[in-house]
Image: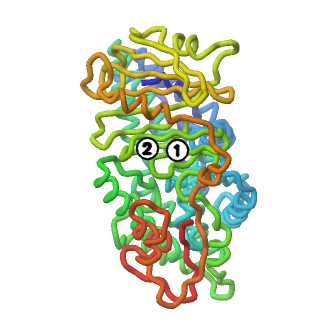
Amino acid sequence: MLPSLPNRRIVFFRAACTRRLGVPDRARGMHAGRAISMEALLLSALLLSAFFLGGCALNPVTGSPDLVFQSEAGEIKRAQEVHPMLLQQFGGAYDDARLQAYVDEVGQRAARVSHRPDLKYTFTVLDSEDINAFTTGGGFVYITRGIMNYLNSEAELTAVLGHEIGHITARHPVRQQSKSTLAGIGSAVVGIATGSGDLAGLANYAGAALISGYGREQELEADRLGAEYLAKAGYAPEHMIDVVRLLKNQELFEIQRAREENRKPQVYHGLFASHPDNDQRLNQVVKAADKLHGTADVRDPGRETYLQQIAGLPMGTSRAQGVLKANRFYHADLGMTIAFPSGWQVGNLSDRLIAVSPAKDHVLQMQTQAPPPNTGPREFLSRLLANSSAGPAEAIEVNGLQGYTAVVRTAKTALGVVPARYAVIYYNNLAYVFAGASRGSNGKPAADPLFMSSIKTFRRLRQNEFTLAEPYKIKIVPVESGTRIADLAKSSPLVSYAEAQLRLLNDLYPNKEPVPGQLLKIVQ
């Protein structure tokens, strides 16, 4: 496969409240009549340094002490450092100042009635079609435009943001990181005691597995806090259950679709992931929050306001990410287009396009790089494949664009160590780099003719094709008498599962119908 951008491992040092660890003072010198071991000294030193750096912290929600390895200032600093990396990972902030301001306004309203109202909150809509929302702590909350397509009111948006604010106020990210730090300290002790880096890595992996995800109790606590903030902001707390229901439906549909497409489902991590259907505990925490919901200040759920705000949101990838129509990919900003083999599944990732055959035995990917100055396609590809056993190579011209291609006899790919076709095409100050591989091939990839055929469809975008490079978008229409979702699906540009997707978008899944006069989301 093509060499990827280098992975950046982010390492943070966190401060802890050591007085709550229950370690007797005598452990600092002797224990049970024996001299303390080197690994115990290391552990004590780390914990003592953590004490002086951080001290004890009170949980803003419960008021009780927390074992945390990070002060509030450290929590904010860490979130600020991670922020640009997250933007890069998720395709950046969605380029719509009006929508960003609206989400910030709704989020700030919930933050003001939270347990940490003095914390500076930053709400960001990510340019991602994923259905997700999350926080890194420190006041930073992220929501994808993908999940916003499926919400139906301002109250539901508040529920999602309130849930993430709940994670922040209860310091779940910091508490999770503290557990990770303790697991890391434990693995360091294992490494010193055994002299085995492998055992240390295994211990660290086990610690990471133990704390992956917030877990059932913390998610339920975030739900409870989110419902409380909903009520204090003037909305009915039951909107939290509405969000859980519609996202649970989305999850069920995604699991079914992934099974049919033979891939792993992509599901939302929080609000509903830990909840079974008809969750009694969730209903109890929402009912408790309802006591805070005054009858004099009941706020309209804001369905019409919200729907007008999301009108025009892309359904799928955005213009800045490029769009796929049938088997052809268009990118207006880059001014290029390319066609992939019919029937192949194409993934538009943050740093590359990946096309996979139906049987998953062939794969072709494309990514871009800025070529070094005064370097032509041949030299560029030679440098890229410098450590590979390259076979036949030749210059190519693709629709008036210069390029170079070669076959590598043995390349490490997701399909194993197999031959791979590499090609590079220069266009508009960028090098478009292609790599194709087939499972169980010798000499050349089994699908090499298909790879080359697809590569040779790469060309400049024609003037009349820029409209094709626009994504499908959400449009808001009033429901007329006799309108049925199945009829709307017939004229929808959505290629697959059109009826199910329209029902999910409008909280009508699996078989409800719209009411005349209500506003409905369609895709155009």
| Near-viewer residue (131 or 489) | 489
Residue 165 image position (x, y, % from top left) = 60, 58
Marker disc for residue 377 = none
Q: Are marks 2 and 1 in contact (CB under 8 Å)?
A: yes
Q: Residue at x 33, y 40 (%)?
A: 357
Left or right of 284 on screen, residue 383? right
Q: Residue at x 29, y 53 (%)?
A: 259
Figure check: 320 above or below 298: above
Amino acid type, mark 2:
Val
Amino acid type, mark 1:
Phe
The N terminus lies in which quarter of the figure?
top left
Q: Quadrant of residue 226?
A: bottom right
- Label 1: how many Cα within 10 Å (few below 14, some 14–19, many 20+): many
Residue 304 image position (x, y, % from top left) = 64, 78
Q: Quadrant of residue 155?
A: bottom right
| Near-viewer residue (159 or 452) | 452
The C terminus lies in which quarter of the figure?
bottom right
Residue under circle 1?
A: 329
Residue 518 image position (x, y, % from top left) = 57, 84
Residue under circle 2?
A: 346
Please report whichever mark, 2 or 1, sits nearer to the chain's N-terminal start: 1
Q: Assign a secondary structure to mark 2.
A: strand
Left or right of 471 on screen, residue 35? left
Q: Residue at x 49, y 37 (%)?
A: 353
Q: Assign a secondary structure to mark 1.
A: strand
Figure check: 511 above or below 141: below
